[in-house]
Image (spheres, helix red, strand yellow):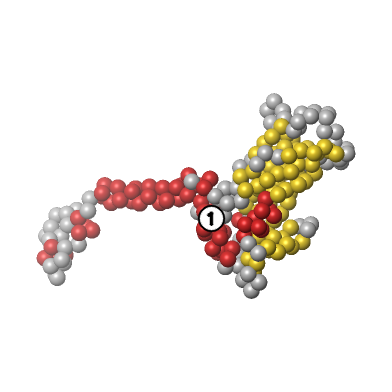
Amino acid sequence: MPSCGKPLDTALSDPAGYSDTRRRVPGYLRNRRCLNTLIWLITALWLPAATAGDYSARIGYPQWQTGERGYTAGVQIEYRLSPTAKEALHKGVPLTWRVILELRHPGPLWDETIYNRELRYTLQFHALLNQYAVETENAGSEMFLTLSAALAFMASISADVAPPGENPNSAPLQLAVKTRFDREALPIPLRPMAYLDHRWFLSSDWYLWSIPK
């Protein structure tokens, strides 16, 4: 009878003559394989985030106008759609961005937000019409023959950035602008991939400027 803890003889354990090599792999090698698999999975998930800026939107320096109600800012946004986002768009998936504008008082530790405004833009392709539609909350829907024309319409933002009663000259002010791609507006099957794949990282960073007196 074989001693306890040792593998059985091949003739007894495998009558067909084939040895089960999995039983002969030492435990430390199996642990190393598990560790390598785990490292590969972590790397696969981390790499998309490392290149998140490839298709992120960019915001240009704003133009200012002063009126009775405060400031009006004109902002240009460069949207850069990835091939994956374009493919989804042309299959009928609407893409939504939310442009956030904030007016802030800079402080020694943190900035105080005194005004916040959000503008929503939804881009959709209509295959039957072979046209692109841009839907906004206030202006309804606009139709365009090309994608570049639709993105150009979305790119130009003109908005009041001072609330009623706020004196623009009372204190230093800063304008913060960000456009956020709304992943939650995507169809449910696309949402998990949109959070992991850098080709869906279509938002911009926060852009901050001091408002001239």
On screen, 105 above or below 199? above
Report crowding for label 1: few under 14, some 14 to 19, many 20 or more residues within 10 A (C-alpha).
some
Which residue is outermost to the bottom?
128
Q: Looking at the image, which residue is at 68% across and 63% down?
A: 144
Q: For mark 1, give the secondary structure.
A: loop
Task: State left or right for residue 59 relative to residue 166.
Answer: left
The residue lying toward the viewer, choosing from 56 and 106, is 56
Q: Residue at x 88, y 39 (%)?
A: 68
In the rendered image, residue 126, in percent from the top left (x then y), is placed at 64, 69
Q: Is residue 177 visible?
A: yes
Tell which residue pokes out farthest to the top in this image.
108
- Horizontal side of 39 relative to 113 (left or right) equals left
Q: Position of residue 100 (x, y in %)?
A: 70, 46
Quarter in which the C terminus is drawn = top right
Which quadrant, please, contains the N terminus? bottom left
Q: Amino acid at mark 1?
A: Ser
For the point 54% across and 50% down, the residue is 55
Horizontal placement of 22 versus 103: left or right? left
* Position of residue 128 measured from the top left corner of the image (x, y, whole percent): 64, 74
Taking depth in this image into account, of 74 and 93 the one nearest to the observer is 74
Tell me if I can see residue 4 in this picture.
Answer: no
Figure quadrant of residue 85: bottom right
* Tag 1 residue: 82
Q: Residue at x 54, y 63 (%)?
A: 87
For residue 69, what is the image quadrant? top right
Is 116 situated above or below 152?
above
Count up the numbered dots. 1
Q: Tell which of 61 and 16 is nearer to you.
A: 61
In percent of width and height, residue 131 lies at 65, 67
Q: Nearer the viewer, residue 53 or 24?
A: 53
